[in-house]
Image (cartoon, grey):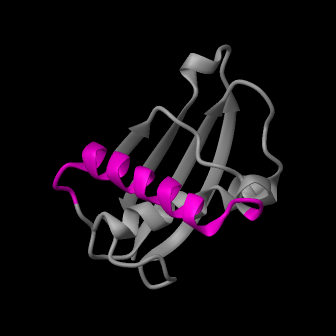
Amino acid sequence: MTLTIDELAPGMNVLMRMHFRTYGKVRDKWQLMLRAAAGTQRFTVPCDVWIVRHYASQPLDPDNRYASAKVILDGLVRSGILPNDNDKCIASLKVEQFKVPTKNRERTEIHITEAAA
């Protein structure tokens, strides 16, 4: 399953400075966007999750890039797409980023596949 969201999740530097209620609003917004993109698709087996950030301005360094997955993983769990975000449900997590020419082309792609046995 591939979900495309026309927005970028905040990185670690933004998340660390965010008030917990503001984080809740961001998380809830991502939950709704992910639920709308996924429809009725759900996973119950271990999955590989690959998140691709398409950014226009500055790239995130590796720790910021992986921290941006928190909002996305929380949204996937809260929307019921994944049962949990622990090691039993997520076999592997990969976060990459690619530059796009303009800000209106920024997006996040989330690719979820069943993990190989």
Nearer to me, 17 or 53: 17
87 versus 92 height, above or below: below
Q: Residue at x 35, y 50 (%)?
A: 34
Work out which residue is located at the far left of the displayed protein and give it. 40
Where residue 45 appears, x then y in whole percent? Answer: 31, 76
The secondary structure making up most of the magenta span is helix
Q: Residue at x 47, y 67 (%)?
A: 74
Where residue 69 appears, x then y in whole percent? Answer: 59, 59
* Numbered disc total: 0
The quarter holding residue 5 reads top left
Q: Is residue 57 left or right of residue 8?
A: right
Q: Residue at x 36, y 46 (%)?
A: 33
> Which segment did they paint magenta?
16-41
Q: Is residue 64 left or right of residue 41?
A: right
Work out which residue is located at the far top of the displayed protein and give it. 101
Quarter of the image with the C terminus in it: bottom left
